[in-house]
Amino acid sequence: MEVQSTEETYIQSLFAERIGGKMFGKTRGEYKFEKIKRAKRAALAAHPGMELIDFGVGEPDEMAFPGVVQTLQREAVKPENRGYADNGIQEFKDAAARYLQNVYGVNGINPVTEVLHGIGSKPVLAMLPLAFINPGDVTLMTVPGYPVLGTHTCWYGGTVVNLPLLEKNGFLPDLDSIPVNVRKKAKLLYINYPNNPTGAGASRDFFEQVVRFAKKNGIIVVHDAAYAALSYGAKPLSFLSVNGAKDVGVEIHSLSKAYNMTGWRLAFVAGNERVIAGYGNVKDNCDSGQFKAIQKAGVHALDHPEITGEILAKYERRLRSMVEALAELGFSAKMPAGTFYLYVKMPKGIRQGKRFVSAEEFSEFLITEKLISTVPWDDAGPYVRLSATFETKGMADEQRVIEEFKKRMGGLQFEF
Ligand SMILES: Cc1ncc(COP(=O)(O)O)c(C=O)c1O
């Protein structure tokens, strides 16, 4: 959070407690990504002319594909697309249901009542608590992870109970360990597979266990499938493809990562009709829908899942080289089940004498000393996340970047 040097006025006394009350903007918050940005700027200034190896970025490094861009160009000039889209055009909802069937084998989604779009999946996650959380209610959140559903739960007076994702459990939450009193208050369970940041995938068995757990305890499952299409080796898996999933929850799909469309802001949520209706009510009171021309470009994307195939091949190639490089350096790195992230345990130190007490410290060391950017996670053990979305000057340049990474890391002699 930026420290603001404003003159004190009555405005300062009016901020809501949820964002800090009268202290809003006066304390340096610990928002990790702000810190990383600051460390990056400082490191660049300290090493002028040196190339930044940026494994810290969480979004695609390339443009949306030509067919998608051309559809937007064509649709943007049509008068019928100019107005409010409200809760979305039926064509996009139809395409979403088709996509679920074609790519994930999910049958029987009613595109009229069981699908709605979102201006990205982030606002969907932000709005769901508005539909369900009363003061005192609990949301179960896996950590480390994408915190938006939890943040909004707290803003409406709810409580977040964290479910740690541990390596020994395959980075799946241990649902059996959730105490009965917590289960009683829990209304929402957030899961995300393939998972950011761990790269872990979920099995059909795990999803079946989630359905049983949700039914037994009367909990709504929110499956964040932002990376579901980016799965390596196995066919991508949808929570909705599991028997009974639609009785207990919804799944959110994003076009951001699967189609290089982060800035376009387009996603959809599908599944339980009552959850979709609640979200629709809230959404109608929060926004007026994504530009129809963007939704039509989204239809083109969803009908061309081979685009994701091409994107996936690039990430797989890069991730394999990164895994090899990290393994040579002594890290225990392996190909993730999905996403474009590698999640590796922090070394204890380097032979030259330095010890690391947290992933945050290790990550700061890498950026400051080696101009290598990573994202640290200390929520469930010290790990750093390296993303395969680094920018290059074409395919041939990828290997050069990875070799440069190896060279810079090579002199450090890590101890694990
Ligand atoms: C797990 C996860 N969920 C959701 C999002 C948000 O994606 P969108 O661009 O659809 O809002 C992200 C973005 O990084 C993410 O990592």
Image: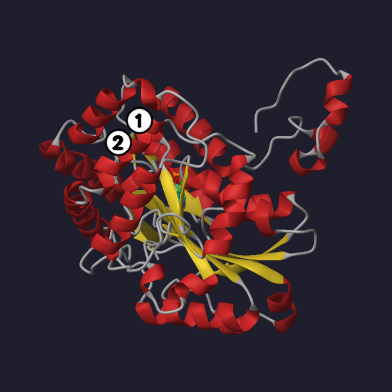
Asked if 189 appears above or below 411 in the picture, the reply is: below
Q: Nearer the viewer, residue 145 or 383?
A: 145
Q: How is the image coloured?
A: secondary structure
**Residue 315's spot in the image, x, y percent?**
23, 50
**According to the image, label 2 marks what residue?**
297
Asked if 364 appears above or below 174 in the picture, the reply is: above
**According to the image, label 1 marks what residue?**
293
Question: Mark 2 and mark 1 in contact (Cβ < 8 Å)?
Answer: yes
Give the SS element for disc 2: helix
Q: Give the CA separation, mark 1 to mark 2.
A: 6 Å
The local crowd at label 2, few if under 14, some if 14 to 19, many if 20 or more residues have their Cα within 10 Å, is many
Q: Amino acid at mark 2?
A: Ala
Give left or right: position of 392 versus 247: left
Tell me the residue at 50%/36% (across/down): 289
Give left or right: position of 94 versus 151: left
Q: Nearer the viewer, residue 412 or 307?
A: 307
How many numbered circles are shown? 2
Quarter of the figure with the N terminus? top right
Q: Nearer the viewer, residue 283 or 325?
A: 283
Quarter of the figure with the C terminus? bottom left
